[in-house]
Amino acid sequence: MQLSELLGLNVHDATARHLGTVIDVRLSLGAHSIDERPAAPRLLGLLISPRTQSSYLGYERSDARRPLVLATLLRWRHRGTFLAAWDDIHTINSDLVQLRSEYTRYSPLLRNERSHHP
């Protein structure tokens, strides 16, 4: 399965309650400086939205605030969106993602971690 095939899939909890739709995937690259060779990307989890099938358009970054009207609209539209960790995925098939019974809802926001060099 390709990651793009996950986009748009319905997501249910362990009791078959509909939670939303997969709107994006979250990856980790592993390298922390420009001198390091990045490792292969690792899938951290899936972004699940209860209200929309559209992406955040980059406004999931905590420091993305301009243009203000667009940032406000997208954050309102995506209220309730959460990140489900890859370890919380119980099953995936061609039309459904099911989370395990004790899954955790993580914040979908990406925080800007600036490295400080002397």
Image (spheres, rainbow, N blue to C red):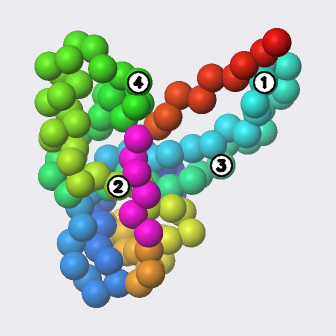
- Give the number of the mark in front: 1 or 4: 4
Please tell me whether mark 1 sits on a helix, a strand or a loop. Answer: loop
Q: Residues within 10 Å of mark 2 (few under 14, many from 20)?
A: many
Residues under numbered marks 2 and 1 in contact, where contact means CB atoms less than 8 Å apart: no
The residues bearing labels 3 and 1 have C-alpha atoms spaced at a distance of 17 Å
Please tell me whether mark 4 sits on a helix, a strand or a loop. Answer: loop
Q: Nearer the viewer, residue 59 or 27?
A: 59
The residues bearing labels 3 and 4 have C-alpha atoms spaced at a distance of 24 Å
- Residue 82 disc label: 2
Q: Nearer the viewer, residue 71 or 29?
A: 71
Residues under numbered marks 2 and 3 in contact, where contact means CB atoms less than 8 Å apart: no
**Count of residue discs:** 4
Give the mark, 1 or 4, whose residue is nearer the N terminus: 1
The residues bearing labels 1 and 4 have C-alpha atoms spaced at a distance of 21 Å
Which amino acid type corresponds to the residue marked 1 in the rendered image?
Answer: Ser
The residues bearing labels 4 and 2 have C-alpha atoms spaced at a distance of 18 Å
On screen, residue 42 above or below 84? above
Residue lying furthest front in this view?
Answer: 118
Which amino acid type corresponds to the residue marked 4 in the rendered image?
Answer: Asp
Give the mark, 2 or 1, whose residue is nearer the N terminus: 1
Give the mark, 3 or 4, whose residue is nearer the N terminus: 3
Magenta stretch holds residue 106: yes
Instruction: Give the magenta part as a residue range.
Output: 104-109
Identify the residue at horizontal 32%, vertical 77% (top origin): 13
Identify the residue at horizontal 59%, vertical 51% (top origin): 43
Residue topped by disc 4? 63
Which amino acid type corresponds to the residue marked 3 in the rendered image?
Answer: Arg
Residue topped by disc 3? 42
Q: Residue 45, image x and y in percent?
A: 50, 56
Please tell me whether mark 2 sits on a helix, a strand or a loop. Answer: strand
Which amino acid type corresponds to the residue marked 2 in the rendered image?
Answer: Phe
Residues under numbered marks 3 and 4 in contact, where contact means CB atoms less than 8 Å apart: no
